[in-house]
Amino acid sequence: MADEIKLMKGNEAIAHAAIRYGVDGYFGYPITPQSEILETLMAEMPWEKTGMVVLQAESEVAAINMVYGGASTGKRVMTSSSSPGVSLKQEGISYLAGAELPCLIVNVMRGGPGLGTIQPSQADYFQTVKGGGHGDYRLITLAPSSVQEMANFVGLGFELAFKYRNPAIILADGIIGQMMEKVTLPPFHPRRTEEEVRAECPWAAQGKISSRSKNVITSLELDPAIMEENNIRFQKKYKLISENEVRYEEYRCEDADYLLVAFGSSARICQKTVENARAEGIKVGLLRPITLWPFPSAAIAKYVGQVKGILSVELNAGQMVEDVRLAVACQVKVEHFGRLGGIVFTPDEVLQALKTKLL
């Protein structure tokens, strides 16, 4: 069967992939620049095709708590929003992490702080990678840089979320959400039967007949000793994820004298910067983190001794640069370049920043 290739926005690709991957439920609330996810799902009416529930909640807070309820039964459920909306979801995200519930969250970032602007940004890095809610928890964080990856990461996000019983998030920016590209849509995966859900998720609350055998899903523990045991278990899980799920991409790094580190749309721009720099005789490479958590620290650290400097390129005031500096442990000069307020830099601006800060 030939691949189904279509031209669509990144947001639309998320919606179509959700239907095709057999997602059981989507609960969301409109906010620019991600509203097309909900709009596309409503237009496609997947409840008639696959039985998928699509619901516009009364608020972002309601949406994330609906995700909590659906996830507690072992179903594949997801939500999406943009930066201010994700801020409202933080309590629920922390509860999901504390209850070890798998789900998928999508954040198509816009400029802030506050209501900010509807223009693109990457300033939610701290909120997501460092944990925007309360407590010691982590989100598996995937950063797409193409419309194709927006589609692909729906399946990958659910795969990792269920593998580790942990929320996963697709952290995109407004450019990737709104831009149009060709995308190969995944084949249809049937939704799991109730028997398959019970077999895959024996921990889930599924209304068993005996009240004594019902699973209790909660993040509450009043005994501090048990709560510490829970947290120790969480940290062991996070260590396992860090050891096994790091993903990144390298571009012309083998002979690089200088390294750019960028994710999402910034990485696309930096590819052109690499070409422009090399045309001027400056050997530059690009490392693109695909997982922002777990972060590819070891991959960056291996360039200690090879490169003369590293430039962290982000659409923010300097957030990922902290993790880049930790990766190289002050053995290489690391600088940051970014634009704020929804302004997107050009390849030439990145090259000029490289020359000014590192050459």
Image: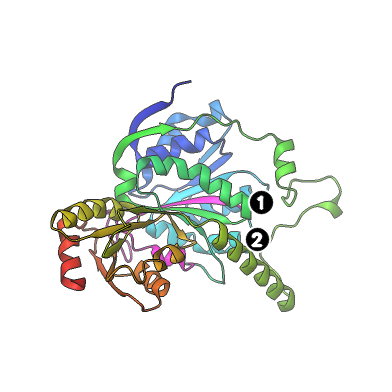
What's the CA distance linking mark 2 and mark 1? 9 Å
| Magenta span contains residue 41 | no
Q: Nearer the viewer, residue 227 or 7?
A: 7
Indicate the colouring scheme. Answer: rainbow
Apparent side of residue 338 relative to residue 69 in the rendered image (left or right): left
Is 306 positioned to the left or the right of 101 in the image? left
Give the mark nearer the N terminus: 2 vs 1.
Answer: 1
Report which residue position mark 1 lands on. 72
Q: From which residue to which does the magenta span run?
A: 102-131
Give me the residue at 38% from left, 42% from top: 11
Q: Amino acid at mark 1?
A: Ser
| Disc 1 element | loop
Residue behind mark 2? 99
Q: Is residue 38 visible?
A: no
Mark 2–mark 1 contact, CB under 8 Å?
yes
- The outermost residue toward the left is 280
Q: Would residue 169 be seen by someone viewing this image from the given angle?
A: yes
